[in-house]
């Protein structure tokens, strides 16, 4: 079984293409082109909304936004990935009033409106060209939001720093689109840097760079898009978030980060069972607390220099993270588990799901020379189970949101 690789298109040429498509659509030159990346979260899953720690990196698949400000209040949008175009009055944008992909763009215009003077025109023409596969768990929506916010920030001279841009994108997603996600994705899309990973502390959304230079150590991070689609707007994601809040309540803390930062009981699982009571809620709480501990150890290992001498434990932490998401948090699915099992059997140092789960993508830390072998093994395991053919790529840590043209 030969694996299908889905590499990202070259950045400069793609930005130029967005510019040309804008001209084709609106009949004039855009003011500029901006783009923002998707992300993988290397470790620290389902902890952001409990003030936890995450280690994301940006991928080279980006969403490109060609845009121009207009002297009106009309917002016009077109996406090269959709048949549907949109035109609406920005003064009428309100949560729940816009649907589908245009809601993510309208939400950004809505989220920054308070920064504009009362009568200042809010109109923009926007052309979107997104390469983060939709529903892949690689933050296609955050890449769209953060690309649009970067464009609006420049076009409307809003003077937002990176943290404020992240906040605007989060408001667009949470309040306008009604997806109550935790801020990891937008933070990663704006604040990641080329060539490294990011330590994101969701207690105050501060970040610091982390070394993650796999190439020089002949290692690679293989991404597997399982093509099992997921959505966070409803259902299971909200349910897990609510369970983690119930666990925090039972522990008498505002967030489970407080428990993770306190001295750990010798048997955390038993401690959670006793303190939290409800069995399912105790499992959810145990995941969050133990995942934060894993991130702390992971960050410590990365800080020690070369990965290779510490590879066994690094891989094990990735594996433990997945196993906890499967058994305690119950957010994996047969496709994710199959990808992870096949990667491990084919010699990956560690493998886990990444993102919200219930579909989406998995990552595997592998020897660079084994990328194709591991991908082929995963593709074969999918074929044997009759799953959709997965897509693969090798993720290099890429730059956060910014202006291209
Ligand atoms: C999704 C959400 C994030 C985060 C992850 C799980 O990607 O958008 O906020 O909660 O799931 O770590």
Image: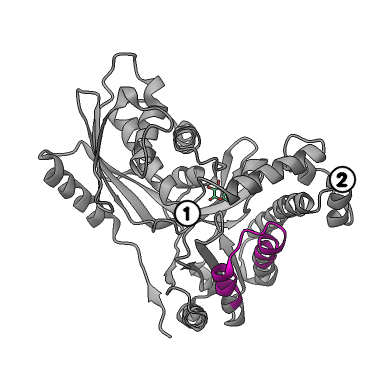
Secondary structure category for the residue under label 2: helix
Residue 253 on the magenta span:
no
Residue 367: percent from the left, percent from the top? Answer: 54, 76
**Residue depicted at x 72% and y 59%:** 328
Residue 274, x across and y down, in percent: 89, 49
Residue 278 location in percent, x, y? Answer: 81, 49
Residue 229 percent across, percent down from the top left:
46, 60
Q: Quadrant of residue 253?
A: top right
Label 1 sits on a secondary structure element that is: strand
Disc sitting over residue 275 in the figure = 2
- Left/right placement of residue 126 relative to residue 265 reads left
Which quadrant of the rendered structure holds the C terminus? top left
Please state the extent of the stretch shown in magenta in the rendering: 319-341
- State the predominant SS element of the stretch in magenta: helix
Q: Is residue 372 above or below residue 186?
A: below
The answer to which of 70 and 95 lies nearer the viewer is 95
Identify the residue under disc 1.
39
- Judge by depth and name the residue closer to the eye, 260 or 206: 260
Residue 359 position (above or below residue 286): below
Q: Within 10 angstroms of label 2, few (less than 14), some, or many (20 or more) residues?
A: some
Residue sitting at 49 percent across and 56 percent down?
230
Dot 1 beta carbon under 8 Å from ligand 1: no
Q: Quick check: 84 above or below 153?
A: below
């Amino acid at each position: 079984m030969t694996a299908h690789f889905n590499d990202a298109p070259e950045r400069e040429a793609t930005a130029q293409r967005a510019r040309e498509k804008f001209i084709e659509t609106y009949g004039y030159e855009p003011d500029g082109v901006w783009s923002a990346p998707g992300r993988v979260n290397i470790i620290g899953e389902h902890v952001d909304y409990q003030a936890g720690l995450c280690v994301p990196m940006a991928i080279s698949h980006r969403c490109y936004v060609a845009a121009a400000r207009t002297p009106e209040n009309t917002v016009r949008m077109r996406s090269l990935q959709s048949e549907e175009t949109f035109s609406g009055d920005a003064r009428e944008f309100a949560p729940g009033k816009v649907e589908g992909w245009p809601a993510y763009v309208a939400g950004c215009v809505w989220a920054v409106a308070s920064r504009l003077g009362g009568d200042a025109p809010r109109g923009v023409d926007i052309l979107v060209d997104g390469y983060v596969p939709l529903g892949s768990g690689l933050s296609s929506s955050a890449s769209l939001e953060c690309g649009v916010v970067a464009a609006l920030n420049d076009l409307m001279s809003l003077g937002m720093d990176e943290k404020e841009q992240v906040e605007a994108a989060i408001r667009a997603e949470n309040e306008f689109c009604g997806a109550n996600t935790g801020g990891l994705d937008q933070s990663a899309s704006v604040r990641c840097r080329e060539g490294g990973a990011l330590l994101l502390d969701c207690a105050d959304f501060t970040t610091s760079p982390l070394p993650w230079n796999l190439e020089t150590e002949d290692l690679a991070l293989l991404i597997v898009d399982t093509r099992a689609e997921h959505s966070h707007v409803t259902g299971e994601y909200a349910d897990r978030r609510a369970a983690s809040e119930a666990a925090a309540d039972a522990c008498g803390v505002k967030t489970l980060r407080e428990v993770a930062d306190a001295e750990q009981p010798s048997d955390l699982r038993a401690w959670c069972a006793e303190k939290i009571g409800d069995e399912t809620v105790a499992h959810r709480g145990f995941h969050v607390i133990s995942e934060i501990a894993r991130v702390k150890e992971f960050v410590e290992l990365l800080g020690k220099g070369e990965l290779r001498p510490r590879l066994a434990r690094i891989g094990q932490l990735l594996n433990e993270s997945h196993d906890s998401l499967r058994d305690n948090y119950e957010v994996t699915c047969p496709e994710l588990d199959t990808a992870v099992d096949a990667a491990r059997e084919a010699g990956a140092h560690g493998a886990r799901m990444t993102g919200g789960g219930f579909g989406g993508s998995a990552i595997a830390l592998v020897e660079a020379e084994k990328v194709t072998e591991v991908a082929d093994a995963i593709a074969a395991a999918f074929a044997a189970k009759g799953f959709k053919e997965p897509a693969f790529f090798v993720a290099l840590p890429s730059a956060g949101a910014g202006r291209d043209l």
